[in-house]
Amino acid sequence: MPEKIDFSKIRFLICDPNALSLTMLGDILSMLGANYVRRVNDFEKAMGVLKEGNIDIVITEYDLPVEGGNKLCDYIRNDPASRDRLMPVIMLTARSEEQYVVEARDHGVNEFVAKPYTVDSLYKRLSSVIAYPRPFISAPGYFGPDRRRKQMPFNGKERRGVDPNAKPS
Amino acid sequence: MAKPKVQIIQPSLDLRKRAVNFKTGFGVILTPEETVKLQAVVEKSSDGFVRQIAAKLKQLREALAALDDGQAPHPGLIERVATDALEIKGLGGTFKFPLLTQISKSLHDYAAQIKDANVWHGVIFAHHIDALYVVLAQRITGLGGKVEAELLKALRQASTKYK
């Protein structure tokens, strides 16, 4: 029997300054069954919602008024006040050039979806962060999801500490 | 032994435990029927998209028309063109207007690289905006045909020539 995702169990924060994009994304999540979707159009409001807690997944634009989506991700991953440093962050943006993808990845974004997007491409990323979450890496200068997508054979000395019970500090 | 500098932290399975099941919700992999349901949500927003983009283009046209003869676009206008073009780029393809996405990408890239504005920048803006208008007004979904490909090529050439 195939696995399903019950989106009513997940609480979303979606951030986009474009009203139409925000509405459409909210409507897609509602169609999926999500009934807790906080919609904001700028960085400050997004921070306010995050500080309240009660959010499981953030979907954000790169371009948010005042500060960008990467800054939001920085707060989630690195701020001592962050409620959940492992919270999935999906970046949904028209800035699809490689430099923005790399930048977002280095700020700890889990998934990057280039606009214009299809519902299928968005869903794959959502499904991935919920059903198949990636391990996190804590390293000097980086805290976020493992940036390696492929398992490549490595014949050198293993220099990373692997602690299955490690929690973010 | 020195403390390892890099730690691998096992993923949190909280969301998986809470939401993944065998009874309710959408499949971890979407079925064609589920995709159709979600696509219907996008189509429902399609009229709003056309209205929003038409209004933006009208405002940009008016702002360009308000420039005096021989006047270069001011920084605020250039920034607005770049911002609006980026928004159109991000939405066009979702609503089956990939040509809008391509033209607005050309416009955004052009506006974003301007350092010292001159009168030609306004002219190139106007040509892009006119092209976007035509695509929207004629409801040219998909990438169009030979004429549209030539138009896009001409816009890119003009953008390169009048940097």
Image (cartoon, coloured by chain):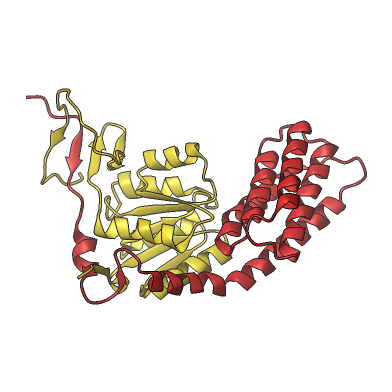
Chain colours: A yellow, B red
* Position in image of residue A62 (x %, y %): 49, 49
Foreground pick, A6 / B137? B137
* Position in image of residue B55 (x %, y %): 73, 65
Q: Quadrant of the C terminus of chain A?
A: top left
Residue B79 appearing in the image: no
> In the current view of this chain or complex, which residue is farthest to the left?
B1
Q: Is residue A47 left or right of residue A156?
A: right
> In the current view of this chain or complex, which residue is farthest to the front?
B146
Q: Which quadrant of the view contains residue A33?
A: bottom left
Foreground pick, B89 / B113? B89
Residue sitting at 55 percent across and 52 percent down?
A: A65
> In the current view of this chain or complex, which residue is farthest to the right?
B69
Residue sitting at 20 percent across and 28 percent down?
A: A154
Q: Which quadrant of the view contains residue B16?
A: bottom left
* Position in image of residue A101 (x %, y %): 45, 41
The correct choice, above or below, for B162 with respect to B57 in the image is above
Residue sitting at 67 percent across and 67 percent down?
A: B50
Q: Quadrant of the N terminus of chain A?
A: bottom left
Residue sitting at 69 percent across and 45 percent down?
A: B107
Q: Is residue A140 left or right of residue B63?
A: left
* Position in image of residue A69 (x %, y %): 46, 49
The correct choice, above or below, for B1 with respect to B135 in the image is above
Residue A82 appearing in the image: yes
Foreground pick, B91 / A23? B91
Q: How many marks?
A: 0
The correct choice, above or below, for B156 with respect to A118 in the image is above
Q: Is residue A126 left or right of residue B77?
A: left
The correct choice, above or below, for A89 with respect to B95 in the image is above
